[in-house]
Amino acid sequence: MALTLSVTDNGDSTVGLAVAGGTASGVVRAAAFTGREGPLAWADVWTFAADGASPPVAVPPAHYVWAAVAGGDVSPPVYQSVADPAPALAEQCLRQVAARVQLLALPRIGGTRVYVRADVLDANLSYPCVVVYPPAEAETPGPDGGTNTRSDWGHPVRVVAVDRKHPSQGDAILPDFAQWRQQLFRAFDREALPGVSGGAVLQTVVEPGPVLRFFASAPGKEYSLAATELTVRCVARQPRGFGS
């Protein structure tokens, strides 16, 4: 029976390895596959004494070619990627921007009415509130470009402070919107954004949106809405290349 190897991604930066058909002790080796030209760099990841399965083996997320070697026998190569369990960088930026807005505890909004939504017109929102969502705008290159192996990209996050617009209120809403906008602007104007893995957020840059705009309410609601909004561009230095 020929030496064979199976590799299972456990989804938590570990893999399960299973060897069969061996006649001697050996080692399982892995080489990161980058899609670039050049030889593979092999590294030993698990030593086995006989046929059987490994405990979970920690491996950095990437794409790999695997092989088992026992004496003079070498298994057929196995291609198996190891997924990164962390959310995508853009999703992390979205959540961390919302977390910072919560810490601001804006007047009349506090830390509980900060929502991450796909749309500001959501019937389940309680007003006044802040809605954080991914806008239609695309990513933009960072001003510094990056390094030989990493690139700078700015991930956009829209931040909108919203309240009901009642005809009886008149101009009474204006001071609140001015205060909310000022605090949001200053909190993200060329600041760091901790808590993001998979790429260092070098800084957040504010791209101003409408100071005050009015639009229809969420479906089924009779009142109209007023909002002040801006985009937080999270400039992150992140790895590039196949499987990164």
Image: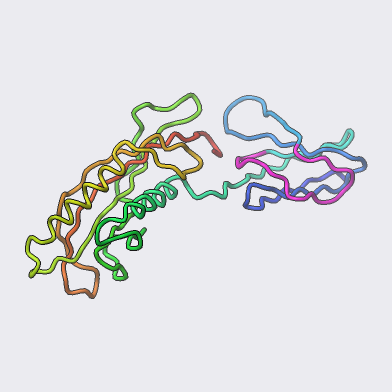
The image position of residue 173, as x and y in percent, is 13, 60
Q: Residue at x 31, y 36 (%)?
A: 190
* Residue farthest to the right, as pictured: 23
Q: Give above or below for 160 relative to 63.
A: below
Q: Is residue 178 above or below residue 42?
A: below
Quadrant showing the C terminus = top right
Relative to 76, is 186 on the left or the right? left
Q: Is residue 59 magenta?
A: yes
Residue toward you, 153 or 187: 187
Query: Which residue is rendered at x = 30% and y = 44% of the image?
Result: 187
As drawn, 8 above or below 31: below
Q: Is residue 131 visible?
A: yes
The total of numbered circles placed on residues is 0
- What coloring was used for the rendering? rainbow
Left or right of 43, for residue 212: left
Could you tell whether 10 is left or right of 116 in the image?
right
Image x and y of residue 100, in percent? 37, 49
Image coordinates for residue 41, horizontal then vertical, percent: 68, 28
Determine which quarter of the picture holds residue 61. top right
| Residue numbers of the magenta segment | 45-64
- Residue 123: percent from left, percent from top: 29, 70
Residue 117 appears in the picture as rendered: no
Q: Is residue 138 magenta?
A: no
The residue at the point 37 percent across, 42 percent down is 155
Between 71 and 85, the one lying in front of the other is: 85
> Is 82 left or right of 4, judged from the image as shown?
left
> Which residue is painted at 28% across and 68% down in the image?
126
Q: Quadrant of residue 243?
A: top right
